Amino acid sequence: MKPADHYPSADGLWTRLRLLPEDAGSASPATIAVAQGRIAWVGAPDELPAMYAGLPVHDGGGALVTPGLVDCHTHLVYGGRRANEFAMRLAGATYEEVAKAGGGIVSTVRATREASEDELFASGAARLQSLLADGVCAIEIKSGYGLSLEHERKQLRVARRLGEAFGVTVKTTFLGAHALPPEYAGRSSEYIDLVCKEMLPALAAEGLVDAVDVFCERIAFSLEETERVFQAAQALGIPVKLHAEQLSDMDGAALAARYGALSCDHIEHLSAKGIEAMKKAGTIAVLLPGAYYTLRDTHLPPIEALRAAGVPMAVSTDHNPGTSPTLSLLLMVNMACTLFRLTVPEALAGVTTHAARALGLQSTHGRIAPGLPANFVLWDVSEGAELAYWFGQRPLRTVVRQGRIASGAAA
């Protein structure tokens, strides 16, 4: 693994590019000037300001260029595997039956608690490298497999280390309210007290928490318990998001919107009330087709209603060991189109502009514009639709991440 600070600088003129517009229409010839790791100028080659004419040239060779991709919902750091649960579900077991049999989230909690920080870093690094090979330049990593202060801290520390080691923007999300740990069986309210009064304040004081999430569902935490966590986050000035309406309509999206949530994620059972609340709050809808596919769900998210309401839709991997063991954001782009019927422009915006907003990164990621850090990807494709069309192929040529050439090489 090459240390991030050893990646070569991307400063200079990136020429012979085809810039894909936000509507994913016909790409236009473009040049990008990068100075001190930031985009200084972008535009048509014949309009290049004279002040940039003498910069070193990186020949893009006619590649299509997009903003760096953003994976806005992952559970990347964990111990163990859960392939046996995949087999159980194929044999007919439901998500809830797997959990009641001792599988599900709690089985990963056991493995994560047993793993050292260095072991979690090594396994997380291998997974992260697969996602980076898809052009990911920013990623969210949740905790939620420790379910105690010691082990939640361990997960979040590993997430921070991964960002530093690979030169990728990592946003950490505290998901202490992911499941009820075995030692708190039958004492859900007491565990939420621990989350709100001890775990969250301590981890926030250590600078390990960028956002707070809750799994609000019949097999997880109630609406009242979720609100207690949101109130604790609000008191600390930390934004919230929610695993909402995945298995049933718990009215969680409307609650999250009242707290100005960055995003509501999964949302297969999202109601009209939830959609309206999200619209008013500016909350992003995060679609997770990998979990939908793995669980063989048949209840589609309300895509047309979200579209009609103008609620932005992001797309993410939801990488986790139980219900979405994918390590390709491009595959999720394809699935968002094929399973959820997103258009190509919607799907590409879902992994750039809208995904950045779902992490509160809209001022630094998801766009190619002057003043932003240089995060963009050169692709060996003829048109933007190919990024959604192909699956099992990675047409990436070069990644510029945090102002450095992180992979590939300009011609």
Image (cartoon, helix red, strand yellow):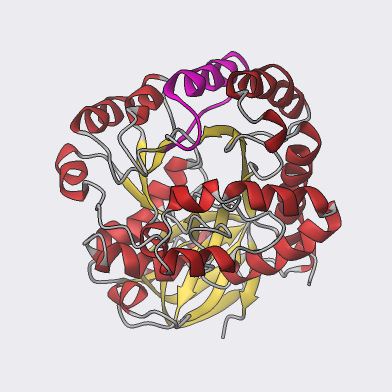
Tally the numbered discs.
0
Residue under the point 57% across and 76% down: 57
Q: Can residue 53 be seen in this view?
A: no
Of residues 35 and 323, the one drawn nearer to the viewer in this rendering? 323
Q: Which image quadrant: the C terminus?
A: bottom right
Q: Is residue 256 visible?
A: yes
Q: Quadrant of residue 199?
A: top right
Residue under the point 32% across and 58% down: 297
Q: In this view, does 218 lie to the left or right of 165?
A: left
Q: In this view, does 389 lie to the left or right of 132?
A: left
Magenta stretch containing residue 236, yes or no? yes
Magenta stretch containing residue 83, yes or no? no
Residue 366 image point, x, y percent: 44, 52
Residue 391 image point, x, y percent: 39, 79
Q: Quadrant of residue 259?
A: top left
Q: In this view, does 32 lie to the left or right of 176?
A: left
Q: Is 398 drawn above or below residue 157 in the view shown?
A: below
Residue under the point 70% across and 61% down: 80
Of residues 51 and 60, the one drawn nearer to the viewer in this rendering? 60
Magenta span of residues: 219-243
Of residues 57 and 408, the one drawn nearer to the viewer in this rendering? 408
Q: Which image quadrant: the N terminus?
A: bottom right
Residue 384 image point, x, y percent: 31, 72
Residue 19 image point, x, y percent: 36, 68
